[in-house]
Structure formats: C-alpha cells, structure tokens
Image (tube, rainbow, N blue to C red):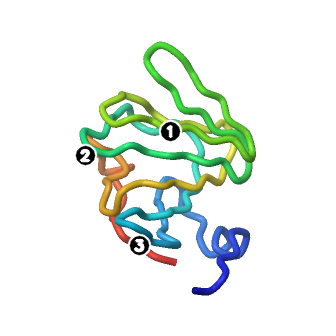
Amino acid sequence: MQPISLPEKFSLFTEQWRPKVIAQLNGQEVKLVKVQGEFPWHHHDHEDEFFLVWRGRFRVEFRDRIADLGPGEAIVVPRGVEHRTAADEEAEVLLFEPAATRNTGNVQDAGFTAPNGVQI
C-alpha cells in the first residue's frame, strides 16, 4: 500500500514491447510498456484491453480505422477485435488487463511475445 511513481517505474527499463507489472487488483494487472514501431496484428479471445497513454503518441490500428492517442487519452479494445498497436516515436503506455494475458494474444511471435508477470 505504497504510492507508485510512474516516472520512476518507467525509468527502470528501456526494452520496448515488454510489459512490466506495477500493480495487481481484482484479477487484473496494471502494466507499463514502452513502444515504438508496429506490433503484429492479433486479437484476444477472452480479454478486453485498456490502453492509457502516459507519454508520446500511440496508435491502435483496426482493419477499418485508426485511433490516434496522445498523453492522457485512453481506449478499450474489446475481446475478439483484431488490432495492432504502433508508435512512430517511443511512447509510454499503461495497460490494464486480466492477469496472465499474453501480449500478442492469438499470435506467437519470437520478436514480440513477452513473458507474463514481469514485475518492477
């Protein structure tokens, strides 16, 4: 039950596309991730995902549209919806999703699939 400093937590890692867990509640994990470039197209059969931009610009691309987000903006991607995330320059994003959600959903990708449960 200690305050969490987001700037401090983001300063603890440099890897991109490797979510880090900073809190757990009610079966959900709050994760931080740094992103740049394009993530693979994927979907999650059973999990909704909530993305909140902390720093930079972040896109969530759908087959029929693109959601472009800046600091303080958020989006929910419902389960089953195919999407990919992207950022032209490095962005810092908070994720809220059920514990043990694989970041690449239905896709296994050696360059992007990250281990679950890595805490900082």
Give left or right: position of 42 versus 50: left
**Dot 2 and dot 3 residues touching (CB under 8 Å):** no
The answer to whether residue 98 is above or below residue 86 is below
Residue 81 rendering spot, x and y as whole percentages: 36, 28
Residue 24 rendering spot, x and y as whole percentages: 44, 71
Name the foreground residue: 53 vs 89: 53
Residue depicted at 47% across the width and 69% down the height = 21
Q: Earlier in the sequence, mark 2 or mark 3?
A: 2
Identify the amino acid type marked 2: Gln
Residue depicted at 50% across the width and 46% down the height = 50
Instruction: State the quadrant of the N terminus.
Output: bottom right
Residue labelled with disc 1: 76
Identify the amino acid type marked 1: Val
Q: Secondary structure at mark 2?
A: loop
Q: Earlier in the sequence, mark 3 or mark 1?
A: 1
Residue labelled with disc 3: 118
Residue 95 rendering spot, x and y as whole percentages: 51, 54
Q: Secondary structure at mark 1?
A: strand
Residue depicted at 60% across the width and 33% down the height = 59
Q: CA distance from mark 1 to mark 2?
A: 22 Å
